[in-house]
Amino acid sequence: MSVGPLRLPVALPRITRVERDRVVAGVCAGIADAVAVDPTLVRLVFALLSFASGAGIVAYLGAWALLPAPGSPAPRRGRRIGGTVLLVWSAILALRGLGLADSVVWPLALVGAGVVLATSSNTFGLRQRHLQAGALVLMVLGVVLFVQRNTGGSASTLLAPGAVAVALMLVLVPWAFRLVRERDAERAERVRSEERADLAARVHDSVLQTLTLIQKEPGDARRLARRQERELRAWLYPDRETAAAGTVAGAVDAAAAEIEELHGVRVDVVRTGDAPLDERSQALVLAAREAMGNAARHAGVDEVSVFLDAGGDGVSLYVRDRGSGFDVDAVAADRRGLAESIRGRMERVGGAARIVSTPGEGTEVELELKQ
Amino acid sequence: MSIPLRRVVLVDDHDLFRAGVRAGLGKTVEVVGEAGSVADAVPLIKQLDPDVVLLDVHLPDGGGQAVIIQVAQDRPAVKFLALSVSDAAEDVIGVIRAGARGYVTKAISGDELTDAVHRTADGDAVFSPRLAGFVLDAFRSGDPVADPELDQLTSREREVLQLIARGYKYKEIAARLHLSTRTVESHVSAVLRKLQLSSRHELTRWAAERRLI
């Protein structure tokens, strides 16, 4: 996971040294320009700070190292690091000069350095992750040092923990916020790209393959197209089209698909309701499969209709074709499929099979299983 | 008896499919206009005032339902026959509830479609076996697409729907149940009415619950 640079919640003004109004290196005039105050005021602040063990002078040097000259690119890495060190040093000097105890100043300096490090994007040319790790270490060190040095805890130092906490929050809150946001965006993007890949794979593996096969074997186009249609529907309308495995509807669908594959006819399954697949309904599905196969083989049609009605009081299934039909009484004796695989099978599980066929008009096999 | 010429508007967003339907329809059906979107279809249908609109369930800007809802008030005489490759029961039942007189799959042959157009124009309901299955599901309590507010079907109506689902033609159903073809048709129309009887508000809620709109 990649993490972008940390940013302080406030925008810092962009400061450059200036040629105009400059006295030494144009640092004070530059700062005054950026924050829109009189340069004299800034120079006064630096002068006053110089009384605190020379903090003003050190700060000036640091700023001079850090701030780019007008019209020139940002200073090189060494100069940036040096400038930062000088600034931190001056801050320490200034704080001590103001009368704060060492036990407060050093922890504050560490935390401050951590904040600077965490909020600098590429000032030091280091990897983002390294920067953040370093910043965290510095800040934790600062807090530990503070706690260790102030176990006795005088009243005047009670302000410091608050300051440390505020500094930490300033850095950590926007950082955590960004982390969460980036992770969410990343996850959404991953889901989208997975969906795209899935669709591409689906289209490639099945649809393109089928189209290629059809071009090679035009005679097989009907069967191939039907198989493809079935697959695509199962994928597009998963809740509706693919009845769950282990149910009668699912088993009937599977049987119909097999018959379509075997005989190249279209088996149109219409269903209402569903029921769990048990030993009895399994027998009904097998009988139905036999009936579909018979219709596909003997009726001379290219479409067979199946209707499954599974409700509270049992399961009914109808296999119908509008083909040649036959005389049921004449063939029933010698056609094992009809007698054994359909009638016998249904009777053994306490169901019934009825076969109605009229030569020239078609056949309907009705299978019934009462609850 | 001469068969009257029916004026038909074809609404489908696939040019190729519209061309196929046009070529397959018999001489007794004249395609007077075509549209590929809801926005194009609504003014076209209002202007041409056809006998029947052959309507794709899925259109890019709102679906077949949107066309029916927008046309029905101004042109109550125009009849809609839904045509779809979709097997999603919600889509099909949704367009029927909006006012379509029937639903056939796009795999239907040209002759059957011609026949279906005539029956739709005559005010009959056109139920394919698949639609009959969906409707039986819709009236079955406990099913995900079922609506508890629907009036229940009479046992005769249920019987007729089951026979349609088994692939029987109206005439065959009539013979089997010892009824006239007209009576079978009136049973089917009664089922359609029960599906459509809900108020506009209820329909909207029904559709919203199923994320159709």
Image (cartoon, coloured by chain):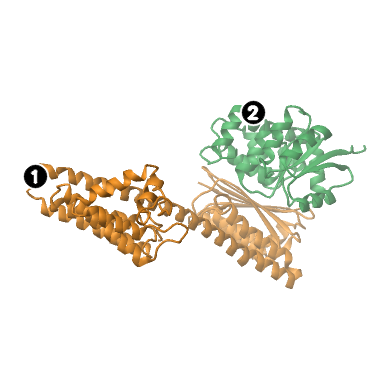
Chain colours: A orange, B green
Viewer-proximal residue among A247 and A354: A247
Amino acid type at image mark 1: Ser
Relative image position of residue A215 (x, y in whole percent): 74, 70
Provide the secondary structure element on which disc 1 rests. Answer: loop
**Spatial CA span between label 2 and label 1:** 82 Å
Viewer-proximal residue among B72 and A196: A196
Q: Residue A154, which numbered label?
A: 1
Q: Kindly give the residue lying farthest to the bottom in the view shown.
A: A216
Residue bearing mark 2? B197
Eye-nearest disc, 2 or 1: 1
The chain letter for the residue carrying disc 2 is: B
Q: Which corner quadrant of the image does residue B187 belong to? A: top right
Relative image position of residue A270 (x, y in whole percent): 63, 49
> Are discs 2 and 1 located on one and the same chain?
no
Q: Say if residue A43 shows up in the picture.
A: yes
Viewer-proximal residue among A58 and B177: A58
Viewer-proximal residue among A169 and A28: A28
Amino acid type at image mark 2: Leu
Q: Which corner quadrant of the image does residue A199 belong to? A: bottom right
Relative image position of residue A341 (x, y in whole percent): 60, 62
Relative placement, left or right, of B185 versus A17 is right
Crowdedness near tag 2: few (<14), some (14–19) or many (≥20) residues, C-alpha within 10 Å? some
**Residue shown at 76%/39% (left/top)?**
B41
**Residue shown at 73%/30% (left/top)?**
B72
On screen, residue A286 above or below B24: below
The chain letter for the residue carrying disc 1 is: A
Q: Kindly give the residue lying farthest to the left in the view shown.
A: A152
On screen, residue B74 above or below A35: above
Quadrant location of the N terminus of chain A in the rendered image: bottom left
Crowdedness near tag 1: few (<14), some (14–19) or many (≥20) residues, C-alpha within 10 Å? few
